[in-house]
């Protein structure tokens, strides 16, 4: 819940991740060992599931970020050079 | 990696927990969404609806999450398997028939092919068995021979010492020896082997050592014996202290020097050897016949084998041995024993004899069983084809019946891939279970069949692997899998093309008619094949009947027979003569025995003593035309109930030195045409001395069979054993008053009291003996009858199924016809016309096939043509009636359709 709101905030509403995509994505990352989850209290005092990045997850994030940077650089270059 | 494994484990075994966790998570999310929306000013109901709308179908989210879990494929398959088992269980008739079809198809084929593989195609358990060859001489050797592939000892020595193609050569001679233990005796098969036997074969010892060349250097010098592994286990309880002990063979003490390798029973698996003795001990092991010291080259008795040198092919070796063989023959043709017994014309033929090399793993059993087994393999091939057709038909029928179920499942959101997989799993379940059943069946069947084919003790030792040869297994299982997959998946593929709504709406399932022609074709094929199998069964059963009706030419009821060979105990000629005379008197007095006859040759066992004869007007003869001979006791003809046509038969007074003979009518016709045979004289051609015609014919008997039931009685001459000076074993015939089987036990006991050291061999009724001689024919006849019956059953099921289905699809049409005034007989005619057309087409194809294939089985048929019209007609009638009835049932049902009900059905 918090995650999708935060994504929406950070991207100024450009990305609105719905539950149908969010949950499978979270579980896939958990299966891959990039996230761990635990139950806890939310800021509104409700039971909620919290996801934390693991060490492997952080590493994966790094490589993915690098990959994305390469791609976006390349895309930018390709688009700005007519 | 570890976490991944853990996830896998968790997903598989703690699915419930995970699922509830997921539900909770989704619930919490939903509630938070709702709470937020309420805060933003929505009413609770509105908030719920909006939150749900945003989230999508909860179930779908849940399913999506589940789908990404590790190991989900496995879980699904388990689900499919469970579902498949349930569906199969819900339809037991289909499942049973399908399983039976599969088991039959795989079972029959595997059983037959395994038998063929292990009996006919199997190689000996020796080092590089494919490099081992048997060395034989083609053509007529003009002397005494002990079996088809034998050569003389001097010829073996010449070949062994002068060839350049073998890395080693050995020879062997199979013999029966008497094994003494305690106060009892048994006759066991032994292999007399040259010193090079074990080293050349590459067979070692489990215990002790094998026979080495130095054990076989000097005649009579080394009384040693090697036990076969199976004999050591069964007879000596695998006693490891056996080496160094002595056993008694033919009253000679022999030292056990070792136990052979497991699974090795000599070079003739059809006649497994229990002990191996150096061939230099031949005098002791086969008293009264000494081929070793008697260096006559006319006496062929050893079977010779060679191991091809590396790089030398069988063909090249055979070619390069010819000059050597020719020079050996040149030498032999100049020897006096050859010139005495052969003419100049014989000499030219003799010099054209050649060396022939045969694969070393061939033997009498494989020769004998090759044709019938290939035939049965071909028959089971047809059964397999039929089983596949039947299975295909069943699966197609089932597919049609399930079309609605599949449509329903598609409609409620099952993926097509999932449905295809489901059907795949079901087919595999069926195929797997059916094939395993078939393999178990095959294993059992092989044990039973081997017991029919081999003597009891040999069958027990003949190892049949429970897992058949990989190639057979792969082929049979592959065919079955393919059939069940192809026809099991057809509905899935078609199902995904059907309009769901159409299929669901239409009650009588008119959605697909395309399976009907295919199913008709399959049924037609089944009918054609079952006709073929029926015709085969008819021919083989009638062949067996013909042979059984032939009879040997004398009554076989109440006739007992057994063999003894006291000469193995070292009795002298005089002792033997007295032994036989006392035995004759003793058995004559036995209660229940009416008469006793002795013969030196067993009759109807395929053996023959043939010799060229000469007389005043005839001299010599090619071996095929030589008369067959035997020495008999005085009571022989009376015991066998063979009447005297002219003159008299032997009495106890015919004890020599004058030589007398009783001949049969063929002999009289052949050698004394147009003359009174009584008082004529002839003599046996002998290579030891010049023959003189000094044997006088005293009587003539009618023609009776000598070797086997199939033969035309050959010219026969009988001599009195009392006039002979040379004795060996004899076969005893006893005519009894009542059931001869009741006398067996007391006879055994009487013989033990008479002489405990002389074992009784092969005690049986002549009826049983003749029955055993027809075992191949009986096996082929009974199995082909079973296959034929099953084939008809399968075809009938197929025809019934396809007709019933066609009728049920046409119920409405029939209803309309009847409403418009069609009679029941009209409806019946419509349905039956199709059924009969189908049967007719199948029969036509089957008859064409049967006529084409007839030549292949001609050699297995006796007393009728392989294209026998009665058998063809009879089979066709049986099949038409059976299949017609199968078609009639649904046709009758169709004709009793009530038009109103039929029309209301829509």
Image: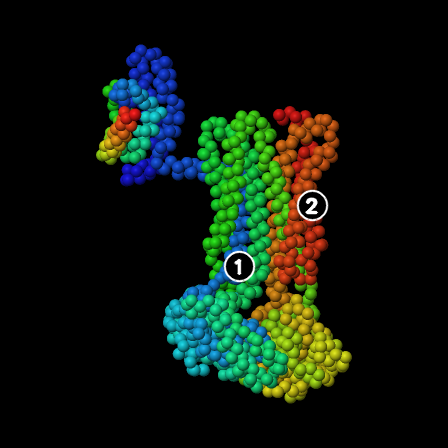
Residue at 57% x, 40% y: name it. B394
**How far across and how far down the image is residue B822, in percent?**
73, 30
Q: Please tell me in which quadrant of the rendered image residue B349 appears.
A: bottom right
Look at the numbered discs 2 and 1 and tell me whether their residues touch, using CB distance below 8 Å. no
Between B173 and B493, the residue placed more toward the observer is: B493
Q: Nearer the viewer, mark 2 or mark 1?
A: 1
Residue B279, visible in the rendered structure: no
Dot 2: chain letter: B
- From the viewer's perspective, is residue B759 above or below residue B123? below
- From the viewer's perspective, is residue B760 above or below residue B859? below
- Secondary structure under tag 1 reads helix
Q: Please tell me in which quadrant of the rendered image residue B593 appears.
A: bottom right
In this view, which residue lies farthest toward the bottom? Answer: B657
**How far across and how far down the image is residue B737, in percent?**
67, 70
Circle number at residue B116 = 1
Task: Give the CA separation, mark 2 to mark 1.
Answer: 35 Å
Q: How is the image coloured?
A: rainbow
Residue at 67% x, 73% y: name it. B714
Residue at 64% x, 38% y: name it. B803
Dot 1: chain letter: B
**How far across and how far down the image is residue B310, in percent?**
41, 67
Q: Answer with left or right where residue B667 lies relative to residue B787.
A: right
Q: Please tell me in which quadrant of the rendered image residue B1 appears.
A: top left
Q: Residues within 10 Å of mark 1 (few under 14, many from 20)?
A: many
Q: Residues within 10 Å of mark 2 (few under 14, many from 20)?
A: few
Between A64 and B538, the residue placed more toward the observer is: A64
Q: Answer with left or right where residue B226 lies relative to residue A35.
A: right
**How far across and how far down the image is residue B117, in percent?**
51, 59
- From the viewer's perspective, is residue A13 above or below residue B272? above
Q: Which residue is mark 2?
A: B881
- Secondary structure under tag 2 reads helix
């Amino acid at each position: 819940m918090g995650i999708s709101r935060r994504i929406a905030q950070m991207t100024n509403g450009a990305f609105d991740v719905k539950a149908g995509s969010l949950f499978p994505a979270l579980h896939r990352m958990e299966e891959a060992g990039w996230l761990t989850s635990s139950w806890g209290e939310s800021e509104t005092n409700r039971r909620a599931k919290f996801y934390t990045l693991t060490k492997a997850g952080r590493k994966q994030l790094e490589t993915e970020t690098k990959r994305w940077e390469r791609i976006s650089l390349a895309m930018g270059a390709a688009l700005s050079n007519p | 990696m570890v976490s991944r494994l853990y996830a896998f484990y968790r997903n598989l075994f703690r699915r419930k927990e995970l699922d509830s966790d997921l539900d909770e998570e989704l619930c919490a999310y939903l509630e938070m969404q709702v709470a937020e929306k309420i805060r933003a000013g929505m009413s609770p109901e509105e908030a719920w609806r909006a939150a749900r709308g945003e989230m999508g179908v909860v179930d779908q989210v849940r399913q999506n999450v589940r789908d990404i879990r590790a190991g989900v494929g496995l879980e699904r398959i388990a689900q499919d398997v469970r579902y498949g088992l349930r569906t199969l269980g819900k339809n037991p008739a289909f499942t049973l028939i399908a399983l039976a079809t599969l088991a039959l198809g795989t079972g029959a084929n595997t059983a037959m092919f395994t038998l063929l593989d292990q009996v006919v195609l199997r190689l000996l358990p020796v080092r590089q068995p494919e490099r081992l060859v048997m060395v034989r001489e083609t053509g007529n050797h003009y002397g005494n021979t002990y079996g088809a592939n034998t050569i003389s000892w001097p010829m073996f020595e010449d070949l062994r010492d002068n060839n350049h193609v073998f890395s080693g050569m050995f020879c062997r001679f199979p013999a029966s020896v008497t094994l003494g233990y305690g106060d009892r005796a048994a006759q066991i098969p032994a292999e007399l082997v040259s010193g090079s036997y074990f080293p050349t074969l590459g067979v070692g010892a489990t215990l002790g050592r094998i026979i080495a060349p130095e054990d076989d250097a000097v005649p009579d010098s080394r009384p040693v014996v090697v036990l076969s592994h199976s004999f050591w286990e069964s007879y000596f309880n695998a006693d490891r202290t056996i080496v160094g002990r002595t056993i008694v063979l033919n009253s000679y003490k022999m030292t056990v020097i070792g136990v052979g390798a497991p699974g090795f029973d000599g070079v003739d698996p059809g006649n497994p050897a229990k002990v191996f003795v150096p061939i230099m001990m031949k005098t002791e092991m086969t008293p009264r016949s000494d081929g070793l010291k008697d260096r006559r080259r006319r006496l062929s008795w050893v079977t010779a084998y060679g191991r091809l040198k590396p790089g030398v092919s069988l063909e090249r070796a055979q070619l390069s041995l010819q000059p050597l063989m020719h020079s050996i023959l040149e030498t032999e043709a100049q020897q006096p024993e050859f010139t005495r017994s052969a003419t100049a014309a014989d000499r030219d033929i003799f010099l054209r004899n050649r060396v022939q090399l045969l694969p070393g793993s061939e033997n009498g059993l494989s020769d004998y069983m090759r044709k019938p087994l290939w035939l049965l393999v071909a028959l089971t091939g047809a059964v397999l084809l039929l089983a596949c057709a039947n299975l295909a038909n069943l699966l197609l029928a089932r597919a049609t019946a399930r079309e609605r179920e599949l449509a329903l499942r598609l409609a409620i959101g099952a993926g097509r891939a999932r449905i295809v997989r489901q059907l795949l799993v079901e087919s595999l379940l069926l195929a797997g279970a059916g094939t395993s059943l078939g393999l178990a069946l095959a294993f059992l069947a092989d044990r039973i069949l081997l017991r029919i084919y081999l003597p009891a003790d040999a069958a027990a030792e003949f190892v049949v692997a429970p897992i058949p040869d990989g190639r057979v297994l792969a082929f049979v299982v592959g065919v079955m899998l393919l059939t069940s997959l192809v026809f099991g998946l057809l509905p899935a593929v078609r199902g995904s093309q059907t309009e769901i709504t159409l299929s669901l709406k239409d009650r009588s399932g008119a959605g697909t008619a395309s399976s009907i022609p295919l199913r008709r074709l399959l049924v037609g094929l089944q009918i054609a094949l079952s006709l073929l199998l029926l015709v085969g069964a008819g021919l083989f059963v009638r062949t067996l009947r013909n042979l059984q009706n032939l009879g040997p030419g004398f009554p076989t009821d109440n006739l007992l027979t057994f063999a003894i060979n006291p000469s193995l105990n070292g009795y002298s000629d005089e002792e033997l003569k007295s032994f036989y005379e006392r035995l004759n008197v003793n058995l004559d007095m036995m209660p229940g025995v009416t008469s006793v006859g002795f013969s030196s040759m067993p009759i109807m066992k395929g053996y023959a003593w043939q010799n060229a004869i000469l007389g005043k007007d005839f001299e010599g003869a090619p071996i095929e035309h030589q008369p067959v001979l035997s020495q008999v006791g005085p009571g022989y003809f009376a015991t066998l109930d063979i009447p005297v046509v002219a003159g008299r038969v032997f009495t106890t007074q015919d004890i020599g030195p004058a030589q007398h003979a009783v001949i049969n009518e063929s002999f009289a016709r052949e050698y004394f045409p147009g003359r009174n045979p009584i008082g004529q004289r002839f003599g046996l051609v002998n290579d030891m001395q010049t023959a003189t015609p000094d044997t006088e014919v005293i009587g003539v008997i009618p023609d009776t069979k000598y070797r086997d039931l199939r033969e035309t009685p050959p010219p026969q001459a009988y001599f009195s054993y009392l006039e002979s000076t040379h004795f060996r074993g004899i076969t005893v015939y006893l005519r009894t008053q009542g059931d001869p089987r009741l006398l067996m036990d007391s006879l055994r006991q009487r013989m033990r009291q008479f002489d405990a050291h002389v074992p009784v061999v092969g005690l049986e009724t002549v009826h049983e003996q003749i029955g055993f001689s027809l075992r191949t024919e009986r096996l082929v006849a009974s199995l082909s009858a079973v296959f034929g019956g099953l084939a008809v059953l399968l075809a009938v099921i197929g025809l019934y199924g396809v007709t019933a289905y066609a009728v049920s699809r046409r119920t409405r049409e029939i209803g309309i016809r009847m409403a418009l005034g069609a009679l029941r007989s009209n409806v019946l005619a419509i349905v039956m016309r199709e059924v009969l057309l189908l049967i007719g087409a199948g029969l036509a194809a089957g008859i064409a096939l049967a006529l084409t294939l007839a030549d292949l089985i001609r050699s297995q048929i006796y007393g009728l043509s392989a294209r026998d019209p009665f058998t063809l007609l009879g089979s066709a009638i049986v099949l038409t009636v059976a299949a017609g009835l199968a078609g009639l049932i649904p046709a009758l049902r169709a004709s009793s359709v009530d038009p109103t009900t039929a029309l209301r059905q829509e």
